[in-house]
Each structure stands twice: as C-alpha cells, then as structure tokens.
C-alpha cells in the first residue's frame, strides 16, 4: 500500500513538471556551415544562427543551435561561404537609385563625346518636345576633356547639336551641378546666344556658368539648377512606384537590408507609406526630412518623430544641404580652390538656419544631419551645433547629430566630432573615386592633413557611418568596403593606398556598414549585429571578405540576402 502511494506521487509530480515546463522554442530557419561574423563583441564569430520569424533566436555553436530545429525548420548550409549582419547603406538617395535605373545612366561615361552619343541614341526613341533626363557624368573622371571648356567644364554646343528638339537635363554624378542643352535653357527663358536677359538669373548659393562673352555654357551649379528643374514635368505615380520597386531590388542584389535616405519630401513620404501598406517595403528605410521644405519641418516638429514599430519606415531626422561637392567646386572652403583661384565654393544654406534647425531638433526629438564636404562648411556646422548644445544643455544627452560626408576637415576641427558627439557619415568609395583628382582642388597639404580622415576620427572615439551616396556612386557595398581598407582606387592604385595611415581595419569597415550605421539611426538595439533578439537580416557572400587577399577583395559577390528571416535575393 505504501509503495503504491509513492508510485502514485511520483507519477503525479512527473505530470505536473511536464505541464509546467515551457514549450521548447523551434526555429523557422537554421543557418550554418561557413564563417559567420556577428559584429557582436561578446562572440565575434559563431558556427550557426537560428531565427524564429523576423528575429534571431540563437547564435552560437552548431550543436546548441540544433536544439531549436524540428521537421519544419528551413536549413541553409553555407557550404563554406560567409555571412554577416545585413548591410546598411548609411547615406544614399533611395528614389534617385530607382530613377537612375529608369533614366539615362551616365555613370560609366568616360568623355563628353560619350555623353553626346548616349543622348543622340536616346533622341531616336524620344518624341520631339519630350524631356531627356540623365545622371552620372563627372568631368574629372573622363579620359580626356573637350577642346572647349569653361572653368573646367564642357559647353553645351555639341550636346545641343544632337538634340535640337528635345530639352535635355543631365545631372552631375555628385548631384551638385547639372548640364542642360539649348532647348532646355530656351524653355527656362535663358537667352542662349546673347548676354541680354541673363543677369536676372542669379541665384544665391548657386552659379549659372558663362563663357567669356557672358553666354550660359549649360552648366548650372548648386541652387542655380532650379532654373531648369522647375520646368521639368512632374513624374507620374506609376513611374514613382516602378522606381521604388527597382530600388528595392537593387538593394537586395547588393545585400542591403537597411537604407538611410538622405532627404525626402511630402510626396516621397506618401509613396513610402503606400508601399509599406502594400507589403512592398522589403527593406528598412531610415528617412531624413528635407530641410528645403520649412512647412514640412514645422508639421513634423509639431507631431514628433515616427519610430515604426514594424521597423520598416522611421522618420526622426532632418537633412540640411549646406555646401556643394568638390567635383563641381561647390564645396565651401576656408581657403580658395587650388585649381580655381579666388573661388571658395558655395554656402548653399544660411548658417543661421542650421542653428535654428539644431535648436528645433533638440526641442522636438529630431536628429539633424547636415551635408558638409568642404572644411569651412564642416566648421560652420560644428559651430552651430555647439551653440545649440550650449543653449539647450538638458536636451543633448543622446542627440546623435550627424555631418554627412565630412569629406574635408581642418585639422583643428577633427577632435570636435568626438567632443560634441557628432557622428561623421562618410562614404569611403568617394575617396576611391575622388582622391586622384581631389588633390588638384585642394593641394597636397590640405589633402594629407584633413581629407578622408577615417582612422583619426575612429581613434578619437566617434563611430563612422559608411555608405555610397548612391546614385552619386554605384550602390555596391563591396567597393566601399574595399576603399575603406585599401585606400586605393577600384583599379588598385596606388601601391599601398593614398594616405595609408587612415585605412580602416576590416573589422572597423564591417562595423561601419552594420552596427555603427545602426547606431547612427538610434537602431543598434534592434539591428547591426547577429545577436539573439535582434532582427533577422543577413548578407551572405561568395568568399570570406575578412580574410581574402586584398587584390581579390573586389571579386566578392553577394549571393544571398535574408530580410526579416526570409530569403529575398539569391544569385542564380
């Protein structure tokens, strides 16, 4: 009888324990079989990653990960290939990326004649009177210059000759200058063949370039571009949707799962909300409100930031465009351009508005991201940020204000980034493509002391957000990572790299495209590393980009992109 009681009690306790123990979690996806770099300091590499839905369930050894496997778990065997957290484009123009695939892409043109030929070909399939739009030319990257130039730029004559009945507008790769033909200038009201009437077309913060007789050459610098753009017909909703979908696909092909969109307006916000509602937003957009629209800023200051609980579309920052680019000689410098004496570039936004925006950002919970390429623009913005921080000290605990590009700095201003907590968002590939000719703009001393100062900034204690500034440069993150660690052009020159002491380590470069980019958007707690509980976004490559020989680095290809725990791209 006593034995029966003991047996009954044992069975009862066993049943009670079984009922009260939590149900074992199972993974929807298990990835293993190759190097997995986590960008998590607690365990920098792991053997396997298990995910459940859109979250990382476990990262560690394969034996431990298999506990989460059942018959429904999808298995991905890397077969020796490499995985990292999903890459984040830290500064780009998302719709510009999409439209670059729809319009005339001039990024690979190597001469003015190639531009003329591309437009002549486009004219054949374009109705008379219809605009031809393109982007991507860069005169400093051409193999040769035309015989006739003004201030280092081509003139419109050859372009106009092949497109007499179509207005043509071709944006510089940097986005800070443009090139228009005679028909476009005629529509804008410019007198192409005489000086008469052109004087009314002066724009503060911009330049209509003219030849020795006072005639417009077709080059419009900085804010003067609006003289032409205000006459270009608005795009259609259908075309916007198509450009959006093309941009998403381009991101997926390149392993990009997050995108910092540097300056959008009301129409683009509405489009993004529409795409999200239609379940077409298959990446995470961190959008910056354009600082050109004061009414838009006022509306958002009143309602406050939008931090998306779905982690797809977040709006909590403002983008200010404060100077131009080195390529168009629009970057705002403390000393004149070496190759254009007496010219200092352009202040494209009043500095008092930078301080006003900084104060409004602090008061209303918005990060401020100011475009600055030249050393004077960087200094002036740091001064305005600092003044705002001093005026509102109680609001500056975690502002994460940024300077976009921070390409050329005065040595005295480099430590101010860490001192003020201002994040430099720097696109390493700009060094690769610009450095060979940037020395002509700035001279050797300014280049060596203050241009593309990645390692100095990192050592000062401030993270760097990396990217490409697409469509200024191609979206390809491999090129930007290569530039980060080699300081070479994409042709592998020069031996040893430009200013090699400023190279990033491979770990720093990867972090600048993942965890530090997430930090630059207040999102380091939800993405940027392969850590349990974070979002299941991953990029898989054909080779180990952390160990492959430098001369083979550019052969790295993205072969799979996983977003929200689902494969959204697989290379055929």
Image (tube, rainbow, N blue to C red):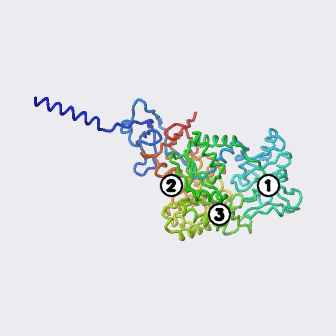
Q: How many marks?
A: 3
Q: Is residue 527 left or right of residue 490?
A: left
Seen in the picture, residue 474 relative to 203 is either above or below; the reply is above
Q: Disc 3 or disc 1, which is closer to the eye?
A: 3
Q: Is residue 28 visible?
A: yes
Image location of residue 228, percent across then percent down? 78, 54
Quadrant position of the C terminus in the picture = top right
On residue 522, the disc is 2
Image location of residue 547, percent across then percent down? 49, 46
Q: Disc 2 or disc 1, which is closer to the eye?
A: 2
Q: Is residue 96 left or right of residue 418?
A: right
Q: Is residue 337 visible?
A: no
On residue 154, the disc is 1
Q: Between disc 3 and disc 1, whose residue precedes? A: 1
Q: Quadrant of residue 98?
A: top right
On residue 530, the disc is none
Image location of residue 246, percent across then percent down? 64, 41
Seen in the picture, residue 351 relative to 261 is either above or below; the reply is below
Query: What residue did someone put label 3 on?
Result: 374
């Amino acid at each position: 009888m006593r034995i029966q009681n003991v047996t009954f009690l044992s069975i009862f306790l066993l049943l009670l324990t079984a009922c009260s123990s939590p149900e074992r979690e199972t993974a929807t996806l298990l990835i293993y079989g190759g190097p997995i770099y986590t960008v998590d300091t607690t365990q920098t590499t792991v053997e396997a990653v298990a995910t459940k839905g859109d979250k990382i369930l476990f990262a560690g050894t394969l034996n431990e990960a298999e506990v989460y496997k059942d018959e429904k778990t999808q298995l991905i065997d890397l077969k020796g290939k490499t995985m990292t957290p999903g890459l984040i484009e830290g500064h780009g123009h998302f719709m510009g990326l999409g439209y670059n695939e729809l319009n005339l892409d001039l990024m690979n043109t190597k001469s003015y004649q190639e531009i003329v030929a591309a437009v002549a070909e486009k004219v054949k399939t374009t109705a008379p009177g219809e605009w031809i739009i393109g982007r991507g030319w860069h005169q400093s990257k051409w193999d040769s210059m035309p015989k006739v130039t003004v201030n280092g730029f081509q003139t419109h004559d050859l372009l106009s000759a092949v497109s007499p009945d179509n207005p043509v507008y071709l944006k510089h790769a940097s986005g800070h200058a443009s090139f228009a033909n005679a028909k476009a200038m005629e529509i804008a009201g410019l007198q192409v063949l005489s000086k008469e009437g052109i004087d009314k077309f002066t724009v503060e913060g911009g330049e209509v370039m003219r030849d020795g007789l006072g005639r417009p050459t077709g080059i419009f610098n900085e804010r003067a571009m609006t003289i032409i753009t205000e006459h270009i017909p608005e795009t259609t909703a259908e075309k916007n949707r198509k450009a959006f979908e093309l941009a998403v696909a381009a991101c997926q092909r390149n392993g990009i799962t997050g995108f910092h969109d540097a300056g959008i307006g009301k129409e683009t916000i509405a489009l993004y909300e529409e795409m999200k509602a239609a379940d077409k937003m298959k990446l995470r957009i961190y959008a910056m409100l354009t600082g050109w629209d004061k009414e838009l800023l006022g509306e958002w200051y009143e309602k406050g930031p939008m931090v998306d609980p779905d982690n797809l579309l977040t709006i909590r920052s403002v983008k200010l465009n404060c100077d131009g680019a080195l390529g168009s000689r629009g970057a705002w410098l403390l000393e004149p351009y070496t190759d254009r004496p007496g010219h200092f570039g352009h202040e494209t936004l009043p500095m008092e508005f930078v301080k006003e925006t900084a104060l409004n950002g602090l008061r209303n919970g918005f990060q401020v991201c100011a475009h600055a390429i030249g050393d004077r623009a960087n200094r002036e913005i740091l001064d305005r940020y600092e003044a705002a921080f001093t005026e509102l000290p109680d609001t500056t605990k975690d502002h994460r204000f940024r300077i976009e590009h921070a390409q050329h700095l005065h040595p005295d201003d480099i430590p101010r980034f860490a001192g003020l907590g201002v994040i430099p968002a720097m696109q390493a590939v700009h060094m690769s493509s610009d450095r060979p000719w940037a020395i002509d703009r700035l001279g050797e001393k300014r280049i060596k002391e203050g241009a593309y100062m990645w390692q100095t900034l990192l050592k000062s204690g401030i993270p760097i957000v990396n990217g490409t500034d697409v469509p200024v440069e191609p979206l390809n993150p491999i090129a930007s990572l290569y530039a980060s660690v080699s300081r070479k052009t994409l042709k592998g020159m020069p031996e040893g790299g430009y200013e090699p002491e400023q190279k990033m380590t491979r770990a720093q470069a990867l972090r600048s495209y993942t965890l530090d980019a997430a930090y630059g958007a207040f999102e380091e707690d939800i993405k940027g590393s392969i850590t349990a509980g974070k979002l299941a976004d991953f990029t898989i490559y054909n080779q180990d980009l952390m160990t492959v020989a430098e001369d083979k680095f550019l052969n790295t290809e993205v072969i799979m992109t996983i977003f929200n725990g689902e494969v959204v791209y697989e290379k055929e």
